Image (spheres, coloured by chain):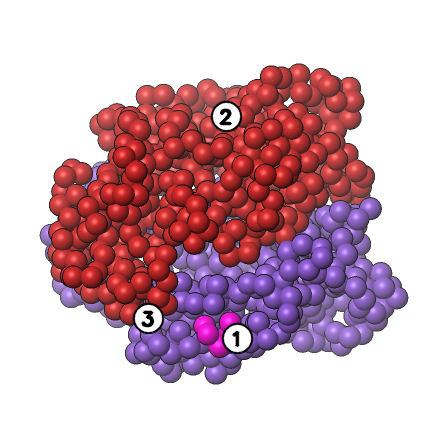
Amino acid sequence: MLETAVVEATLQRALAGGGDFADVFVEDRAVTSATYDDRKVEEMRSGRSRGAGIRVVAGETTGFAHTTDLSAEGLGAAAGAAAAAAKAGGPGTRMAALTRRDAPAPHEVVTLPGEVAKARKVEMLARADDAARAESDSISQVTSSYADSRRQILVANSDGVLATDDQVRTRFAVQCVASGDTGLQTGMEAPGRTIGFEFFDEHPPEEIARIAAARAVGKLSARPAPSGKLPVVLRRGAGGVLFHEACGHGLEADLVNRDASVFRGMVGERVAGKGVTLVDDGTFARDWGACAIDDEGAPAQRNVLIDDGVLTDYMWDLVRARRAGRPSTANGRRETYQHLPMVRMTNTYITPGTEDPDEIIRQTPYGLYCVALGGGQVNTATGDFVFGITEAYMIEDGRITEPVRAAQLIGNGPEALRAVDVVGNDFDTWTGMCGKDGQSVPVSSGQPTLRVAELTVGGTAA
Amino acid sequence: MSDELGEIAAGVAGAARDGEQVEAYVVRSHETEVKVFGGAVESLAVAEAAGIGVRVVVDGRQGIAYAGSLDADVVASVLADARDNASYGAADPAYGLATPADLDGVAPPTLDLWRDDVLGTPTEAKVELAIAADRAVLASDPRVRGVESTDYGDAALEMAMVASTGVRASIRRTTSSVSSVALAGERDETQTGYGFDVARSFGELDIERVASMAAERSTRLLGATQPATRRIPVVFDPMVTASVLALIGSALSGEAVLKGRSMFAERLGETIAAPSVTIIDDPTNPEAFGATPVDGEGIPTRAVPLVRDGTLLGFLHNLYTARRTGSATTGSAVRGYASTPGVGARALHLVPGAKSATDVLAAVPEALYVQSVSGLHSGTNAVSGDFSVGAEGLMVRDGALAEPVRELTVASTLQRMLQDVVEVGSDLTWLPGGTAGVTLLVADMTMAGS
């Protein structure tokens, strides 16, 4: 993307007036998206952005500047601005010679989306639209969207790291509206993978459409969700977002260090029942949060955060790890070159246990069975979290009975973790965009079917 | 500087071929972001960003392309991509850029949304303000034991758009804001409280306001417990009302109506809310942070009454949704340079009532006062109207705020909540994000807790 000499000169300029550390992040991103709405192609869109972000760290202060001008002069000016913002003083830091340290890609991309004709992308949308409408007469509207992105990055820093990555992602979403006597209901399904157009070999558009349509239609006959505390069984894949919110964010070292996490000072302590192991894994091949390197040049790795119920480590980015005198865990991520990196999750999941998922339902006399969740939010300082149910059923006498309408589930992270009392032997993941401090990055979360002994369900039924 | 953006836009629009409409939307922004932690600067970013979006309409087909750069070669390739994308779009006679006839002889309102001090203030002064705000929050109350972070941000944005049909528009506006999250504690309990101030000019920011707000909102939650599940009247804090209003606004968009995604679609002229509810979107009000003289298609904005005394009067439209539904644009096209114009509210507000927030509470024997909500986007559905959010706040007893509560949800449907509005307070507060808040009393919701 850039000549090594230019990158070296930029780093030297960034540290010319002092400072402890500097890095250059170059990003070239191309995206294509298409939306099919109201039975026709509503929008075919393409975009390109390219630029570099330069960071200078001096003591506790980070200075940052970014530019779209990738010439030696443009990069030099941005490096000067970042250095000025960091207010670095004193002698310049000696810079290590840059050495290529590319990490192996976690998996291969078969078909680059940029090499696929736009007409084929539109064809996928039309197929989804047909399949959704064929699912039921009560489907009154269908919106399908296709999106691909290719993000080529280069990271270089004053420690001598020079690494690149080529991240290709494909996502397809179908949202259906069903109309009935009870009004309108919606259903959505939106898988995404860090792969190319071969995505559709695993996820035919018809299959995604049918799931979304059935979800909307099912809710037409749904009864109001219960209100109050009850056992909640989370189907494989559906509940990963609970652990992402309930404990993942609280294990991010930046929040821990600013005393904004209920998990501060708890490494080595039991935070969950035996059988609960939580992992964050950027190498989890093909999943939505996968990468070869993080946005600070560290090779992606598998980090065990909770091992059989005991908290083993937090997630770290480079700058906070340096201050703590330890290695990064490759969790430094940024939305674009215009953003500073911070500690972020990648693919976060609970590993499978031993129980038969059907048996978990049979052992639950009364409770809620959640099949799909729509995202959530957490206050890491208190541990209080929420997440929305988008498809759920009542469990009565150990059997799944009627569907219930959308509602919120709430709880407290440490309490919910301790309340996990059975873990199934199946597994699936969920695709999402995770927001933190105004930056959004692709993540996945996963889990086997499991039961939380007690959560508060915020329905309207007394 | 806008002249330079206007020239770039005019250059692209001027390249339109016979039978082709071309629109260029060019944006440049200057931003400063300061993050303070522990009384010192954690990070400082000073940035300039620019981008262009090009829309092409040809033979009734539309395509768009964009790029985060204004370099001449990039701009040329964006136009070529937009043309290519248009060839894949479905033909629809309702597509088409604004023409001088669409302006209907209406001149855009004159709005002064730019303050020189946002760009003119030295970065050092902005850093000092952020540090002073952080210290003020920490000093505001002995129970405030820490500050999660204090952030200062400002933006100066300039936009120029030119359509080959002869419509041109430009906008420039500034905002600056400072916000902080206080960590209040007693023994091993921690509660958080958000405080902020936002203004068009740097000079108007008030850090004492940030400090007292963060302190009050964090400390009054100390000792919060989970309440018992029951049905109860609910009073929304103005910031919460603004978020709920934004959801209602999305169901009042002509786009939602056109695509069968609005619970209000068939209800024009009907009573959808209590008589105390009047909802207006007025981007011509300079106090609103979403104020703008023209919309994303170059159409002059105007005050759009949507609900009056509980009766649904109309929907928000851009040119496309207006043409498709046989109505007129309300100047409500919203967009960034990377997207086609959608439909949205910019300055949505409830017309305030007569009672102050204190007087609204005084009339209530028992209620839940909701200070903040979480999961608004995962737990509510603007299509079906289902509403269920996590909340924290205080109980109201005998007309006054009483003990704090947390780990609870409040639930109803948006349709029901509109009908159940008992009182709209007089405390109208403009917030970033296109809506204003006001204290709101809703007669009956389900509170779920223990």
- For disc 3, the chain is B
Residue A445 drawn at (x, y percent): 56, 64
Comparing A418 with B312, the one in front is: B312
In this figure, which residue is indicated by the disc labeled 2?
B429
Looking at the rendering, which quadrant does residue B4 occupy?
Answer: top left
Looking at the rendering, which quadrant does residue A124 occupy?
Answer: bottom left
Chain with colour purple in the figure: A
User: Which residues are drawn in magenta?
Assistant: A125-129
Which of the numbered marks, if any, corresponds to residue B64? none
Q: Are marks 3 and 2 on the same chain?
A: yes
Comparing A145 with A180, the one in front is: A180
Residue at the spot 46% in from the left edge and 63% down from the top edge: A37
In this figure, which residue is indicated by the disc labeled 1?
A130
3 or 2: tag closer to the N-terminus: 3
- Up-down: is B312 above or below B58? above
What distance separates the C-alpha of mark 3 from that of mark 2?
45 Å
Q: Is residue B161 magenta?
A: no
Residue at the spot 66% in from the left edge and 25% down from the top edge: B423
Chain B rendered in what hue?
Answer: red
Looking at the rendering, which quadrant does residue B449 occupy?
Answer: top right
Left or right side of A416 for A396: right
Comparing A130 with B322, the one in front is: B322
- For disc 1, the chain is A
Q: Residues within 10 Å of mark 2 (few under 14, many from 20)?
A: some
In this figure, which residue is indicated by the disc labeled 3?
B88
